[in-house]
Amino acid sequence: MINEWDLSQTNLYRLTGREIEVAVLPLGAIEPHNQHLPEGMDWFHTTHIAREICKRAWEKSNNILCLPSIPYGVDCNLMDFPITIHVSQATLDLMIQDIVFSLYQHGIQKIVLFNGHGGNDFTPLIRQLQCDLDVHLFLCNWWRVGMDKYKEIFEKPDDHAGEFETSIALALFPELVELEKAGSGEVRPFRFEALNKGWVQTSRRFSRMNDNCAAGNPAGASAEKGKKYLEIVINRMTDFLVQLAQDQIDMNFPHIK
């Protein structure tokens, strides 16, 4: 069966004459996640969720398109670990800019950047493109979508490769999880109170935090927890895509008339 919501599967015959309102671009990274999770973690889960929300949204509004995902992200601060693949934010921005220009040429003005990697920062790009083109770009860092329900599901905070991410992996691709190899994820604190309290922020070089490229304890992770959180994200983002596809662009969009 051809999935018409999937740009890589559909064809010229099916696309000709069809008006696409929303395009979704998944963005991930290839990097280490402690000792037990796959290097493609961010690419895998982001691609899966993006495809699922587009599939569900298509059933309600068949003018939504999921683009092939970009696997690489900004990972310069993890390069001490093998084999991290890093592309600069400038390079990533240029690729996205060209994709947005292509979509605009085909009449698609609503574009969702569906991001699954904390090192990617698209806010300045979105601001600039919306000034340069008559497009509306929306950024979703998908792991934040259900944060208001986080403490109802998970026991511990997770910054990188801890309980949350391990639960997501167990829910989506358990065959790639080697939990018995996991490090504790314990992180060396900063020497400055301002950094530890969050009054001041800096970019972290992960190799100086610990030797397992993690910032979170994976103990307590389960597939059940991962599925609960994923369902929250998928339901909420499916609803958003449908609303976005069905709403008309006017002089106040996306604000209330």
Image: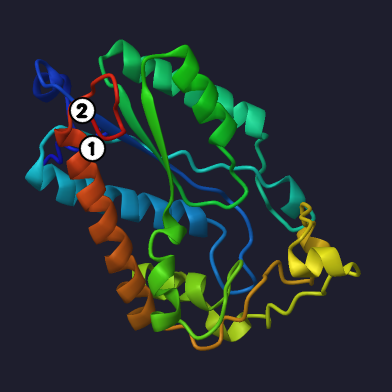
Q: Which residue is mark 1?
A: 244
Residue 128, x across and y down, in percent = 54, 21
> Which residue is depicted at the point 23% across and 21% down?
250
In the picture as drawn, the residue positioned furthest to the right comes out as 191
Q: Which residue is mark 2?
A: 21
Q: Are marks 1 and 2 in contact (CB under 8 Å)?
A: yes
Residue 31, x across and y down, in percent = 62, 55
- The local secondary structure at tag 2 comes to loop
Q: Which quadrant of the view contains residue 69? A: top left
In the picture as drawn, the residue positioned furthest to the front comes out as 257
Position of 36 with respect to 129 (left or right) is: right
Q: Which quadrant of the view contains residue 18? A: top left
Specify few, some or many for label 1: CA neighbours under 10 Å numbering under 14, 14-19, or 20 or more.
Answer: some
At label 1, the amino acid type is Leu
> Which residue is depicted at the point 50% across and 86% down?
155
Q: Is residue 116 positioned above or below 249 on the image?
A: below
Q: Which quadrant of the view contains residue 137? A: top left
At label 2, the amino acid type is Glu
Disc ID at residue 183: none
Quadrant, the N terminus: top left
